[in-house]
Amino acid sequence: MFLGIDIGTSGVKAVALDESGAVAGQGTAALSVQRPQPSWSEQDPEAWWRATTAAVQALDPALRRAVRGIGIAGQMHGATLLGADDRPLRPAILWNDGRSDAECEELEARVPELRRITGNIAMPGFTAPKLLWVRKNEPDVFGRIETVLLPKDYVRLCMTGDKATDLSDAAGTLWVDVASRSWSEEVLAATGLGLRAMPRLHEGSEQTGSLRAEIAELWGMPRVPVVAGGGDNAAGAVGVGVVRDGDALLSLGTSGVIFVATDEFRPNPDRAVHSFCHCLPGMWHQMSVHLSAASCVDWVARLTGASGAAELFARAEEVGPGSGNELFLPYLSGERTPHNDARVRGAFLGLDHDTDPGRLAQVVLEGVAFALADGLDALRDAGTRVAELSVIGGGARSRYWGSILSAAFEVPLVYLKGGEVGPALGAARLAQLGVDGGNPAHVCARPPVSHRIQPDPSLIERLAHRKSAFREAYPRITPKRGH
């Protein structure tokens, strides 16, 4: 039995994987996000640890006793700042926090070769600009920093006492020379840090330590090895077999991600495409990232009084695509690919007296699809060819939304059995690789296909004018600098 733990933004998931690769059990625990100021997004690292223990303890005790290895996945980019006692100095600044917009410009000016080194444009979501912000605005906190960890790696520290990370997650800090798979001392120095503040780097399936005795007792399992794991997107890709050059997935979680595995480093920062290390040796990946995806569905469900996502999908399907003049710009937390705009915010346009909850639900599904299609086009501009997309994440539960997405992308979608399990499944598979070895292509094989959704030509035609209107609307809602 192998255990995968995913430290998400809205909750922690623990998944037990049996020796055949089948999911034997799952446990979850919820998390909340604090937004003390506009564009800020923070969490208490101690909440991650409490939720992790709750999620693991929700698994059947017999499954826990049979665990032979643990892998960890997690939300990327979060700045977890620890003092000399390894305790957090302040709440973690999360991936969807937009406060460090000015610091991105400062960092690019300080390191003219930043995009060549890191393969990415500086964005507020990344960790490095956040540290410049802390240095400037919270100098007392900055002066006490001993270690900077990513969210999943703080949980690892609690589990094992080790300060370690994997290359896929580390690449999202903007402190890694992505081609050479090593920390960049030049970029670290530009943020006032050095190697001593960084955890050890590992490939995703490498063992980083073992459960501390007291944690093993608390969780009811042996003192098993813990592997490095992966950032949530890379781990999610491993979970659904996206491990070869050209394999691709669509992740519909809090954020929306299109992820393509590559066998070489292929950066394209000018279109805000992310180019990171994969969590498997000798592999990299490209991503287009949209900061609000399934979170938009949850938001509009609350706004309209729906009981949850399922009711919202049903309302939208009753109305149907292209049913009104409304548009939704889904930039609730700003945007990355292709606009790299932390200041932009979401908007409904074209509302009239006939606008009702069903039509709002429909245009939210369309708006997220169009924003993701913009990201896919940025990947295509980088020379990437996507023949089909495997779908994972909570949004994968809706076939209706899948039909809209497939039409917006003009690409087939492949739904996999167990695909909604997400990054925790990949983390468990990395644990299996780390303990038993084997060929990643075999251990991380694609799960069986549940169903496929082919692009519907009539739906493509119905959505075409709305897609064009969506793209024309972005410049109209973009805040001007200085406002």
Image (tube, rainbow, N blue to C red):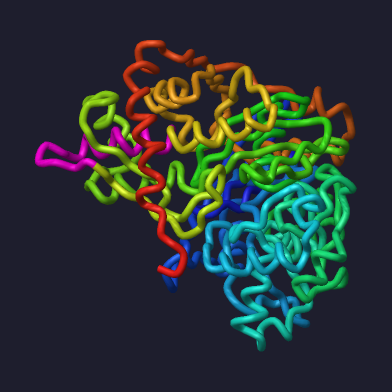
Most distant residue in the top direction: 457
- Locate residue 357 relative to residue 88 in the image: left or right: left
For residue 454, above or below residue 157:
above
Question: Residue 335, percent across and down?
Answer: 50, 50
User: In which quadrant is the C terminus drawn?
Assistant: bottom left
How many labels were placed on the picture?
Answer: 0
Residue 326 seen in the current view: yes
User: In which quadrant is the N terminus drawn?
Assistant: top right
What residue appears at the point 68 percent right and 57 percent down from the top-left corner?
152
Which of the two residues, 20 or 412, is positioned nearer the viewer here?
412
Question: Residue 261, percent across and down?
Answer: 73, 31
Question: Residue 217, percent across and down?
Answer: 73, 60
- Locate residue 412 relative to residue 113 in the image: left or right: left
Main secondary structure of the magenta stretch: helix
Range of residues picked out in magenta: 350-369
Magenta stretch: includes residue 447: no
For residue 57, above or below residue 62:
below
- Locate residue 208 relative to residue 238 in the image: left or right: right
Which of the two residues, 300 or 56, is positioned nearer the viewer here?
300
Question: Residue 219, percent across and down?
Answer: 68, 56
For residue 305, above or below residue 453:
below
What residue appears at the point 67 percent right and 73 percent down from the top-left corner?
132
